[in-house]
Amino acid sequence: MMMVGVGKICRFLQSNSDRRQIFAVVTGDGPAVAFGPLALDQIYADLYTEPYSTRWHPRGDEALAVDLAARAGDFHDLDDFYRFYGYSAELIDWVEATPLNIPTEGMSGHMGGGRDESEAVERFGLDRERLVDAAFREGIVPGAFDPAGDPLYLFAFDANWAVVDPSGHVRINPKAYRFKAWLSLEN
C-alpha cells in the first residue's frame, strides 16, 4: 500500500490464478477506482494520482474497482507477494531488511542502497544475464542522454527496482512493486 496524492492510497493487487494480472486500486478522496490489468511499466503509484485523465495519468474505472472488491478472494496484495508465493521466512526477512537510498542534503551520487545483483541471483535462483538485462532496462532513464550521447542512469530508488551505472554495477530493490511483477513474469 502506498500513499499517493492527498488522501489517496494505491494498492496493487495480483491475481491468484494468473501472476501476469496486476491491478491498481486507488481509494480515498471519492469512490474507489481501479486500473488494469497493468503492463510492467504501469506499476507506478504516481500514475494514478491526478484527478483528470491524460495520456500519463489515466482515468480510473469505478466498475472495475467494484468487480475487484467483489472478487477479493481471487487476489492478493502485492505487499504480500513473497508470503503468498511461499518464499522462505529467511528470504522475506532479507527482502524487508533491504536498505534503500535516503538522499541527504548536500550529498550527491549513488547512495549505496539496495542489494547487489549477485545476492539477488543467488537468493531467488535467477539467471544472472536475464536479471542484469532487465535491470539495465529498468535503470536507464528512457530517452535521456548526457551531452556526449550516453544514456542517463537512475542513481536512486523510487518506483524503479534497479540502479545501474556505466561500469555495469547493478543494485536491486527486491521490495519494489515492479521487481515483484518482474519476478512474476520470469517464473
Image: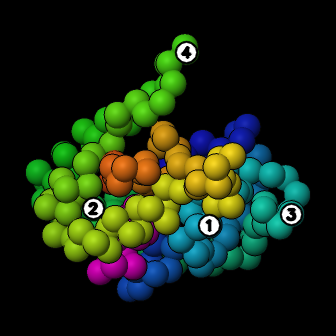
Which residue is denoted by mark 3 in the rendering? 54
| Circle nearer the viewer, 4 or 3 | 4
Q: What number is the disc on residue 42?
A: 1
- Measured in 3D between alpha carbons, the distance from the residue under mark 3 to the one under mark 1, in whole angstroms, is 14 Å
Q: Secondary structure at mark 2?
A: helix
How packed mark 4 is, by other alpha carbons closer than 10 Å (few <14, some 14-19, many 20 or more), is few
Of mark 3 and mark 1, the one earlier in the sequence is 1
Q: Is residue 2 left or right of residue 131?
A: right
Q: Percent from the top left, x then y, of residue 147?
A: 69, 46
Tell me which residue sits at (28%, 67%) in the image: 84
Which residue is denoted by mark 2 in the rendering? 82
- Observer-nearest of 81 and 72: 81
Q: Secondary structure at mark 4?
A: loop
Q: Is residue 115 left or right of residue 27?
A: left
First to last magenta residue range = 176-187
Of mark 1 and mark 4, the one earlier in the sequence is 1
Please determine whether, in this image, residue 100 is positioned above or below residue 122: above
When asked about the image quadrant of residue 150, the answer is bottom right
**Which amino acid type is marked by label 3?**
Thr
- Observer-nearest of 19 and 121: 121
Residue 172 seen in the current view: no
**Which amino acid type is marked by label 2?**
Tyr
Residue 3 seen in the current view: yes
Contact, mark 1 vs mark 2 (Cβ under 8 Å)? no
Please determine whether, in this image, residue 77 is positioned above or below residue 145: below
Q: Is residue 23 magenta?
A: no
Which residue is denoted by mark 4 in the rendering? 105
How many numbered circles does the render carry? 4
